Amino acid sequence: MSEMINEDLVDLDLSADTKEAAARALAERMVAEGRVTDLDGFLADVAAREAQMPTGLDGGIGIPHCRSEYVTEPTLAFGRSTQGIDFGAPDGPADLIFLIAAPAGADDAHLTILSSLARQLMNAEFTSALRAVDDAAAAAALIRGDEAAAAGAATAGSEDAAAAPAGSSASSGAAVDGTASVSGAGVEGETAAQPGAAARPFRIVAVTSCPTGIAHTYMAAESLENAGRDAGVEVVVETQGSAGFTRLDPAVIEAADGVIFAHDVPVRDKDRFAGKPTVDVGVKAGINRPAELIADVRGKAARGEVTAATAPGTPVERSGDPGEGYGTRLRKWLMSGVSYMVPFVAAGGLLIALGFAIGGYRINKAPSVMDHFVWTQADSWGALLFQIGGVAFSFLIPVLAGYIAYGMADRPGLVPGFVGGSISLTINAGFLGGLVAGLLAGGVVMAIQRIHIPQALRGIMPVVVIPLISSAVVGFLMFVVVGKPIASAQKGMTDWLNGLSGANAILLGVLLGLMMCFDLGGPVNKVAYTFATAGIAVSDPSDSAMKIMAAVMAAGMVPPLAMALATTVRGRLFTQTERENGKAAWVLGASFISEGAIPFAAADPLRVIPSSMIGGAVTGALSMSFGATLRAPHGGIFVVPLIGNPLLYLVAIAAGVCVTTALVVVLKGMRRQSPEGAAKEAPGVATAARDESRQPVAA
């Protein structure tokens, strides 16, 4: 902790009356020490973390914290308030405020040191000493763990704690509550004990985690371990924090009598703990009610209540959050299929485009290279590339359907998904048919898995029964029930696209440009991109489909290129970190990676996103009006030789980039203040303005 805090980062007379003002006062000390490069940017990150979950703890403690790109090195600032500040703790205001700042790329060692502070906060002597200390240097030394200062302050703190009435702010409320609850846990544990149980204590394994993984994760672990010692229970904790985590030894889990999950983000590899008595709560319950949780899990063990030994869940469920709605899961299922399909689209599309570039636009009429291939003829090489690309394209719909089903039902969904996708190709149901086939396959497998099967038959279910029944059902539905209507809908959509011209085509280009720049690689962006790639995912795409693909790629290049240009022409409007990001954005934008603009959008969404959308709409409209076409689904400027009307296409991109750049510069210039003015700005006004400019972006 020696490099994280010094006396200049300590304020023993913190006069702030709100958590925002307290964070600002302590953050200003970090700025003065050169630990934070952008005050408002850092405070916005602190506020975003605070919005996820209040950072107040029982016992009069507030620990606002975040990881931020504006932090140069791990830093801790401490403030002590006489009147108390509300940080959302159940027992009232906090008088000990710790502002923890970690760089966005903080290394494991520094995060481990930060976690040690979180554990110290569970020590009543430590917090009492901080309330008693009267010198900033001594407070910093106490927090750092300097032995002489810590010993003297701890003595004073112990005297102060002894003199304080029970339940006062000078004593640790968390510790008082824990002691009272632990005695109950011990009584219940003795009642539940089996004969001979005295030979070894009750054993609990626990997992703690929080959204940031810096403070609450380790405080909950320390709290549970302390309560376990008081109750005579062995508690071993796996902290899944920002410094990474080391999995508990399987032998330790196997020997455990119960499990406690204290978490606000999904527990990783949760299936390891199946089949044991389990208590599942939020991370703050692990901090504030550890003895109660221990008592609960011992009670469940005594009653024989265990969690079912279930499968680890589908790939989508393993990556999701608890309590997600059906709409969110449906989107993830579809995106699962799309994410696996896109590499086939990219490889096949680029190969086909190169085939046309080398062999000419009649290369699709060339005979099979199995029958005719001349090593010295360019046409033969063009035909080879075209035919390889065509084979890659033939996998698109089966892969889409198969991996939608995989996202829903894991590996058992692959066989019926691929079968349904192949049928979609056979009946000309195309991309829409692949979507429906994947959802049907996943649904059928999930329904079969819910049927109770005798133990003797379970071994053959995944390799024989499920593939057989699900493929038959999906095949019947696709061939007989839904296939024909879907094929008609696919044909109607294709005819509509082929009929687009004039104003209708331009309006479609505007809409696609807006979608591509709305969330920069998020769901809306992916919908527009998938719509475009679906149109060219055939050996001989229509002219309209290729125009749509061109408009989508052009619009997607605009935001990162515009941010790169803006940081070049008006660098003073951006932070040093943003200027560095701007250099990378040149390459990302040129490569058609819209995500290159995300750091700028996250920092200032109300200015960057609308500007990007307007520029993207301009580019999309111009691309459609110029009649630019594109057979490749990716590549950015590196596939310009494969684009129809390439010069006008580049003009469309340049126009959109200039529009977005101008809007961003103007909007940022309107609110930009000098550092001196920003420092004098009233804390409440500055915080409100910054919060308004940093609404969440769906990226």
Image (cartoon, helix red, strand yellow):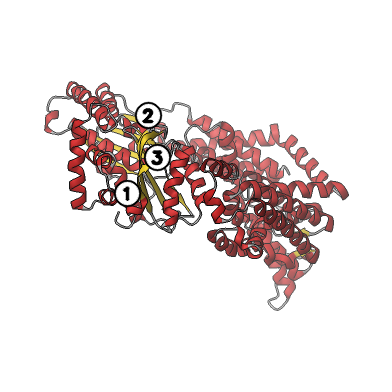
At label 1, the amino acid type is: Thr
**Which residue is nearer to you in this view: 670 or 64?**
670
Q: Residue at the spot x=58%, y=56% of the render?
A: 674
Q: Residue at the spot x=19%, y=52% of the render?
A: 147
Mark 1: few/some/many CA within 10 Å (<14, 14-19, 20+): few
Cβ–Cβ under 8 Å for marks 3 and 2: no
**Which residue is nearer to you in this view: 129 or 651?**
129
Indicate whether 144 appears above or below 315: below
Q: Element at badge 3? A: loop
Q: Is residue 541 visible?
A: no
Residue 640's spot in the image, x, y percent? Answer: 73, 66
* Residue found farthest to the right: 502
Give the quadrant of residue 695: top right
Say which residue label 3 marks.
Answer: 267
Query: Cα distance, mark 1 to mark 3?
Result: 13 Å
Q: Element at badge 2? A: loop
Mark 2: few/some/many CA within 10 Å (<14, 14-19, 20+): some
* Residue found farthest to the bottom: 376
Mark 3: few/some/many CA within 10 Å (<14, 14-19, 20+): some
> Quick one: label 1 or label 3, which is nearer the N terminus?
1
At label 2, the amino acid type is: Gly
Task: Give the foreground label among 3 and 2.
Answer: 2
Residue 148's spot in the image, x, y percent? Answer: 18, 52
Indicate whether 118 appears above or below 367: above
> Quick one: label 2 or label 1, which is nearer the N terminus?
2
At label 3, the amino acid type is: Val
Q: Residue at the spot x=72%, y=57% of the render?
A: 662
Q: Is residue 146 visible?
A: yes
> What label sits on residue 416 in the rendered view?
none
> What label sits on residue 92 in the rendered view?
2
Say which residue label 1 marks.
Answer: 246
